Image (cartoon, coloured by chain):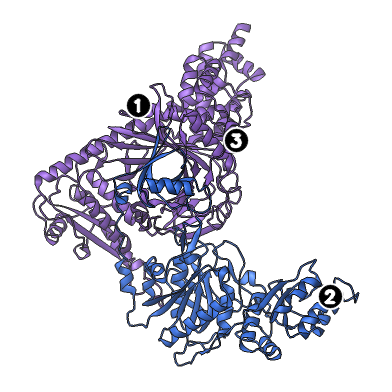
Chain colours: A purple, B blue
């Protein structure tokens, strides 16, 4: 197994190509904002070819709705004004990091457009430029060889989709990102995990590295012998990286196994498909998925009269099915837990057509309320033979057609297709789009090339980068060796620095140890219990710790408040404490409670564990 | 262009633009396709396209270069196959209809990267333009012709003549309508020019363009071309501009050719109707066209088009500003006509309260008029009517022969009309008569209250 990493670190300050300020990672979306509706198309690359990934995304013909908060987005983000010149402050940062890593700088920077047709960039491309190649960054296991260092713009933030439209907020668009790609140097999932941590830490040494949740992201490339290079994006939690890689290895090995089995079965000349309209077989079905799709026929009357399109009725519901020769038993084969070849085909259908999924013959068809006689009729209609499998997609015609086309195209691929996949929250991944290639790059014609000059390098020298050793020593002196080392490696480090009063102007005075324990132990054990700690905002966490610092609550009640915050994100910690009577007992109130309890320390603490601080009670006990 | 030293290096190594090559410097190796060098930037830097698709610049001094044995396709990976136009689109085509004519003139809508400057330049022909928008055939068959490939700031009155002739030929060939992709900067001028040059049009002439070039996924070109083709098939006749109503892809507006300006440098919804609401709108998804203006004539294939396509190229378009001097005005004597874009109601510094003030441009204007230069007034306020009776200065201007009293024309339209009038008539008096005769609603007799609020109406 070989694995490489792509690490993206956001930089703070103005945006890369305009004068808007960058929003904080947890910036709330305050409506009303202007909403802009657009469509995206696959534009051809510099050499005239359309990139496969872009064509795939554009083929989805989605309607995009962009929300533009005026505090952090202007006409540049709205794709209504050409970009301003690249902000040199951010170029200085990358140049400084490149020197720090011993990388070779290019002599002239060319801003490129990387075609992105999923709508996450209003322009249809991401602006990116290659600044340096080679170099290495240190890690406990030895130096990590780097391939490239790029400066690029962040994409727009996706919002829950509504009314069949894909929604994005464009305040996030244009935040500067440093992208570091390593060579495929990691041979075990654990090594990749440690490598990601080391690179992440090195990136955080940059003075302008943005801190907070979501400001650093890791993509991973995995390939196994006989497999293909697969890129997995969108990993939210670094601790899932080893599992993600392991699952990907199993998936690729499983797919290779299946292709061997197919070769053994001997496909001959029959390829999967073609798709057939089998709607008439299911006129009186009790299968909910199918009957719901067919009911849509009555719901949508079609395009308005007078339009050139009124000959179509793309919103009609249809049931499409296709034969997959000699694939019986293979669709249901487990690649890793919860993932089968059938799910891979289903991903293609979902992404290409926006359908909910597909039904295949290796599934328990009774669970869809498909009657045996319906299945029999279908097998007859498709002329199914022994060892053959089938797939069914029921949805509006305009969705079902591209969906089954994509699923069949996937079924025709033997082995591991080159793909970009999306990580899920369980350490698995699903198909996102075909792997993008060189054809998606086009020069950014709105920005002239930038010569790396002595003056630029002078600017870079001003950006001092702390070494990991120096920072490590600082943390050990604050937290002791065990917790200090833990914090140095922690992906919560940035938050830790922020909470203890780093450079971000946070209210100082939070006890470093309390912060470290909360981040590294309390939150971790809460997550293990199944508490949705990711929904606790950074500001709520800070407010909770501040209550403790102000002696308004005890340390012991912090987990309880966090538990409540996870349940109702956006709630106020102080109000939670008041509501549950969790305010810390001090002075006369504590003395009164102590007196009424009979003065037995153990019994008292059992009763008042959440509101009395042990040290306070011990003092009272001594007094007595 | 590369510098001569880099050119020599490349020649010695037998490397040409587009070849994969290897560049070595102090142990660092770059492999990439050699790209053309834009004139901007450092001519000593080799531009390489790496395997990843990134372009970088590598200083050509002190490097060793060599050609790689792989072909261009082997290096970058073979080109992905092109998707075919969807079958649904073919079903939508109406083959019985006579084909529309699409006459390309250039502009951003036909632009892609230009390796001379590194910026975009119009170099897509009408065919390529159409091929990039498979949806276009939903509105029926279309013929194409590439007439010009220039940016609209380079347009001259001679080009208006050329375009007007092209349109007339298209209608003579039986086209039911004409679509004219055009640069957006002076699209309003061309729309006015065609309004004056093409009399008794049998069908629609629709100018369109794009504010985002078609080499990007977000381009407004596909929606604009589709909407324009739909508008060119609809039941009306005349010249109009069809562009986005606002920032969203969804609705396009049809602006009457003599009453439209570009009011923003970069936004999709830059075009606005002035003094007259947009004559109609087009749904960019369905192609449904709604003509809201009852005064717009219906199409009529029996109507015989008359071509009055001569324009003078010797007209000056002058802007009045604080500090303009009589000396400046005296220099206009070589022109056949001058359109003055005055302040407010049609004013200029003539020092009515202080006759003989040396800063007054009145004597110079009077001299122009007396020497046979046709001088006319429009206002730089964009909206509203010229009225040179309100202030004493205005009355002096009129007495000095300045035309345009009570015209609510747009300054750009008035300039084009002066070019046209002087193209039709050499005699200044006759030209002046033509100029002041309302044509194609360039001068409206009355300004309706709701039409005088164009900012509200064109956004509604």
Instruction: Tell me the CA gap for discs 1 and 2.
Output: 83 Å
The residue closer to the viewer here, A82 or A522, is A82
Q: Which residue is mark 1?
A: A191
Q: Which residue is mark 3?
A: A459
Q: Report the quarter where the N terminus of chain A lies.
A: top left
* Total marks in image: 3
Say whether disc 1 or disc 3 marks the residue closer to the N-terminus.
1
Up-down relation of residue A242 to residue B416 (above or below):
above
Residue A537 appears anywhere in the view: no
Up-down relation of residue B422 to residue A27 (above or below):
below
Q: Are marks 1 and 2 in contact (CB under 8 Å)?
A: no
Using the rendered image, report if marks 2 and 3 lie on a common chain.
no
Q: Residue at x 43, y 38 (%)?
A: B63
Q: Which quadrant would residue A341 be assigned to in this image?
A: top left
Drawn side of residue A284 relative to residue A115, left or right:
left
Instruction: Tell me the CA gap for discs 2 and 3.
Output: 55 Å
Q: Which quadrant would residue B222 be assigned to in this image?
A: bottom left
Q: Secondary structure at mark 3?
A: helix
Q: Which residue is mark 2?
A: B350
């Amino acid at each position: 197994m070989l694995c490489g990493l792509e690490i993206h670190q956001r930089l703070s300050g103005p945006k890369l190509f305009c004068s808007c300020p960058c929003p904080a990672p947890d910036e709330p979306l305050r409506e009303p904002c202007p909403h802009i509706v657009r469509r995206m198309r696959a534009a051809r690359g510099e050499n005239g070819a359309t990139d496969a990934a872009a064509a795939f995304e554009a083929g989805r013909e989605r309607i995009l709705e962009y929300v533009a908060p005026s505090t952090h987005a202007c006409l540049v983000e709205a794709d209504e004004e050409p970009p301003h010149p690249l902000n040199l402050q951010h170029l200085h940062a990358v140049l400084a990091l490149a020197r720090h890593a011993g990388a070779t700088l290019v002599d002239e920077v060319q801003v490129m457009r990387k075609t992105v047709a999923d709508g996450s960039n209003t322009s249809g491309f991401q602006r990116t430029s290659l600044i340096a190649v080679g170099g290495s960054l240190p890690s406990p296991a030895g130096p990590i060889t780097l391939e490239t260092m790029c400066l690029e713009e962040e994409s727009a933030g996706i919002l829950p989709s509504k009314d069949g439209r894909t929604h994005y907020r464009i305040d996030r668009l244009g935040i500067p990102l440093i992208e570091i790609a390593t060579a495929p140097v990691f041979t075990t999932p654990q090594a990749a995990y440690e490598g990601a941590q080391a690179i992440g830490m090195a990136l955080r040494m940059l003075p302008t590295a943005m801190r907070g949740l979501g400001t650093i992201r890791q993509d991973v490339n995995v390939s196994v012998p006989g497999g293909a290079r697969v890129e997995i994006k969108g990993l939210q939690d670094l601790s899932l990286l080893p599992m993600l890689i392991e699952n990907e290895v199993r998936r690729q090995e499983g797919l290779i196994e299946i292709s061997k089995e197919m070769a053994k079965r001997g496909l001959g000349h029959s390829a999967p498909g073609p798709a057939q309209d089998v709607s008439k077989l299911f006129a009186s079905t009790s299968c909910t998925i199918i009957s719901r799709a067919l009911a849509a026929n009555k719901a949508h009357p079609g395009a308005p009269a007078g339009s050139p399109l009124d000959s179509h009725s793309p919103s009609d519901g249809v049931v499409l099915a296709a034969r997959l020769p000699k694939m019986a038993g293979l669709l249901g084969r487990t690649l890793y837990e919860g993932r089968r070849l059938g799910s891979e085909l289903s991903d293609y259908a979902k992404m290409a057509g926006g359908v909910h999924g597909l039904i295949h013959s290796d599934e328990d068809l009774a669970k869809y309320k498909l009657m045996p006689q319906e299945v029999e009729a279908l097998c007859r209609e498709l002329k199914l033979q022994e060892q053959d499998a089938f797939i069914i997609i029921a949805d509006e015609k305009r969705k079902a057609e591209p969906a089954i086309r994509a699923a069949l195209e996937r079924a025709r691929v033997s082995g591991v297709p080159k793909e970009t996949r999306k990580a899920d929250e369980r350490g698995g991944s699903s198909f996102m789009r075909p792997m993008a290639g060189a054809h998606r790059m086009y020069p950014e014609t709105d920005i002239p090339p930038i010569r790396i000059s002595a003056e630029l390098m002078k600017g870079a020298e001003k950006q001092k980068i702390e070494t990991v050793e120096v920072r490590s020593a600082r943390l050990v002196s604050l937290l002791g060796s065990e917790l200090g080392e833990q914090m140095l490696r922690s992906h919560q480090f940035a938050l830790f620095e922020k909470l203890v009063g780093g450079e971000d102007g946070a209210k100082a005075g939070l006890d470093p140890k309390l912060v470290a324990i909360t981040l590294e132990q309390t939150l971790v054990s809460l997550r293990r219990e199944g508490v949705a700690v990711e929904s606790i905002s950074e500001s709520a966490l800070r407010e909770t710790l501040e209550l403790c610092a102000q002696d308004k609550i005890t340390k012991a009640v912090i987990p309880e408040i966090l538990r409540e915050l996870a349940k109702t994100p956006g709630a106020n910690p102080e109000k939670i404490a008041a509501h549950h009577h969790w305010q810390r007992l001090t002075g006369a109130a504590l003395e009164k409670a102590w007196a009424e309890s009979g003065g037995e320390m153990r019994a008292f603490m059992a009763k008042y564990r959440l509101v009395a601080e042990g040290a306070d009670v011990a003092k009272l006990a001594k007094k007595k | 262009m590369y510098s001569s030293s880099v050119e020599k290096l490349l020649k010695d190594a037998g490397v040409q633009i587009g070849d994969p090559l290897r560049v070595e410097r102090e142990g660092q190796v770059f492999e990439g396709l050699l790209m053309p060098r834009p004139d901007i930037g450092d001519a000593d830097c080799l531009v390489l396209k790496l395997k990843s698709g990134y372009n970088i610049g590598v200083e050509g001094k002190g490097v060793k270069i060599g050609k790689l044995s792989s072909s261009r396709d082997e290096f970058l990976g073979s080109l992905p196959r092109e998707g075919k136009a969807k079958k649904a689109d073919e079903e939508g085509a109406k083959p019985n209809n006579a084909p529309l004519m699409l006459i390309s003139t250039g502009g951003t809508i036909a632009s892609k990267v230009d390796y001379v400057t590194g910026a975009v330049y119009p170099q897509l022909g009408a065919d390529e333009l159409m091929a990039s928008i498979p949806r276009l055939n939903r509105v029926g068959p279309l013929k194409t012709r590439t007439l010009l490939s220039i940016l609209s700031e380079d347009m001259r009155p001679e080009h208006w003549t050329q375009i007007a002739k092209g349109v007339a030929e298209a209608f003579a060939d039986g086209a039911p309508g004409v679509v004219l992709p055009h640069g957006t900067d002076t699209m309003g001028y061309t729309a006015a020019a065609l309004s004056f040059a093409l009399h008794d049009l049998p069908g629609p002439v629709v100018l369109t363009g794009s504010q985002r070039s078609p080499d990007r996924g977000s381009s407004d070109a596909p929606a604009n071309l589709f909407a324009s083709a739909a508008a060119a098939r609809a039941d009306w006749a005349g010249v109009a501009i069809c562009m986005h109503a606002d920032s969203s892809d969804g609705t396009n507006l049809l602006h009457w050719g003599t009453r439209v300006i570009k009011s923003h440098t970069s936004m999709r919804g830059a075009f606005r109707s002035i003094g007259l609401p947009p004559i109609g709108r087009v749904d960019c998804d369905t192609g449904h066209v709604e003509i809201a203006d009852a005064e717009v004539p219906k199409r009529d294939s029996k109507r015989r088009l008359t071509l009055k396509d001569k324009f003078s190229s010797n007209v000056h378009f002058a802007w009045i500003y604080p500090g303009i001097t009589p000396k400046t005005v005296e220099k206009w004597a070589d022109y056949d006509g001058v359109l003055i874009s005055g302040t407010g109601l049609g004013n200029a510094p003539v020092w009515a309260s202080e006759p003989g003030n040396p800063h007054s441009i009145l004597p110079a204007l009077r001299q122009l008029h007396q020497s046979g230069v046709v001088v006319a007034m429009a206002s730089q306020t964009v909206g509203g009517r010229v009225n040179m009776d309100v202030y004493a200065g205005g009355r002096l201007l009129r007495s000095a022969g300045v035309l345009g009293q009570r015209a609510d024309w747009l300054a750009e339209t008035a300039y084009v009309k002066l070019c046209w009038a002087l193209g039709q008539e050499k005699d200044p008096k006759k030209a002046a008569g033509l100029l002041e005769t309302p044509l194609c609603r360039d001068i409206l007799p009355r300004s309706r209250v709701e039409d005088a609020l164009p900012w509200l109406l064109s956004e509604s």
